[in-house]
Amino acid sequence: MQRSLAVTDEQIATYQRDGAVLLKGVLAPDDLRLLEQGVEQAYADPGRRSSIVRSPEGEGETLVETSPSQRSPALRALIDSGLMAQLAGRVMQTASAQLVFEQIFYKTKGRILPTPWHQDTPFLRVRGMDMCRVWLTCDPSPADITVQMVRGSHRWNVVYSTQAEAMAPVVQAEARAEYNNENLGDPNLPLAPDVARYRDSFDILSFDVEPGDALVFQGNMLHGAFGRDQHDSPRRAFATMWGGPELRYHEPKGKAFPPPGDLRAHPVPDGARIGDHPAVFPVGWREG
Ligand SMILES: O=C(O)CCC(=O)C(=O)O
């Protein structure tokens, strides 16, 4: 039986207005156990869709793994619980939520590397407003090293290039054969603003996030995280992206992350509603 999660009208209004809202204490202890188990397994044995970035000096390390639930029974169980899908559906105010994309961001303790400011949209094969990221942490995550967003950037109606990644103070150290960031996205898109450099020019939303909380933000938001020279614990996060049925499939100009389902077996026409293609974008939650 799926748990029913209460999201208040005020939280929904905050999400719709600002593009992000922190939902406190929505995970149960069993959810947290699955989260930590899945994230630790991925770090101990990185999969073929993972890459590692380090600082140019070789200090600090971030493992990013895409689609980790495809090889982690613990993360699969967490997704199958419907918890994140339901939270996404409730804030988006859609009748269902389908899985679009999922990633682990494992930052090792010591020097915490920043996450370059970017939008997820240009990496993805979907476009539209009904798209929502649910970011969970295994560790207490102070605001400065937690993912932050530019308030209201979900309504800017722009898709930036992925090239902003190249301007970041991190370098790719290792990428497995099937996964690297090179040539992702469409190089003809505009560069994302350099929020890290001009941070006082932006209205930045930041949150202290505890294990058990869900930081929920709209999928088109401009976001990133600052680093720290020294932090006593790792900063381990698992983020899933969910779409409502009206979100549209987008045939990418360049390379883009694969959707969760098999696109070759179930081709999706450009511009199609993802609601009509659950084999490629599996339904994680449905109202009622
Ligand atoms: O956890 C982070 O530092 C990055 C998160 C992120 O970019 C995302 O959830 O899309």
Image (cartoon, rainbow, N blue to C red):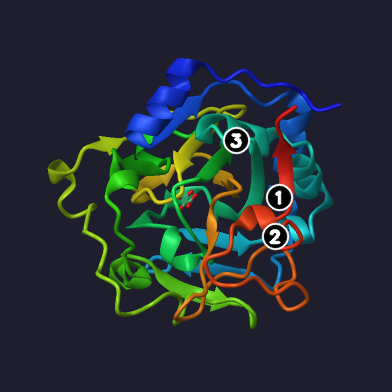
In the displayed structure, 249 sits above or below 6; it is: below
Q: Is residue 59 visible?
A: no
The amino acid at mark 3 is: Gly
Label 1 Cα neighbours within 10 Å, binned few <14 / some 14-19 / many ≥20: some
The residue that label 3 is drawn on is 89
Q: Position of residue 146 (x, y in %)?
A: 43, 40
- Is the Cβ of the residue at disc 2 closer than 8 Å to that at disc 1? no
Q: Is residue 217 visible?
A: yes
The amino acid at mark 2 is: His
Closest to the camera, between mark 2 and mark 1, is: 2
Asked which secondary structure carries label 2, the reply is loop
Closest to the camera, between mark 3 and mark 2, is: 2
Please report the residue visible at 38 percent of the width from the left and 57 percent of the height from the top: 119
Q: Position of residue 264 (x, y in %)?
A: 73, 78
Sequence-first disc among 1 and 3 = 1
The residue that label 1 is drawn on is 40
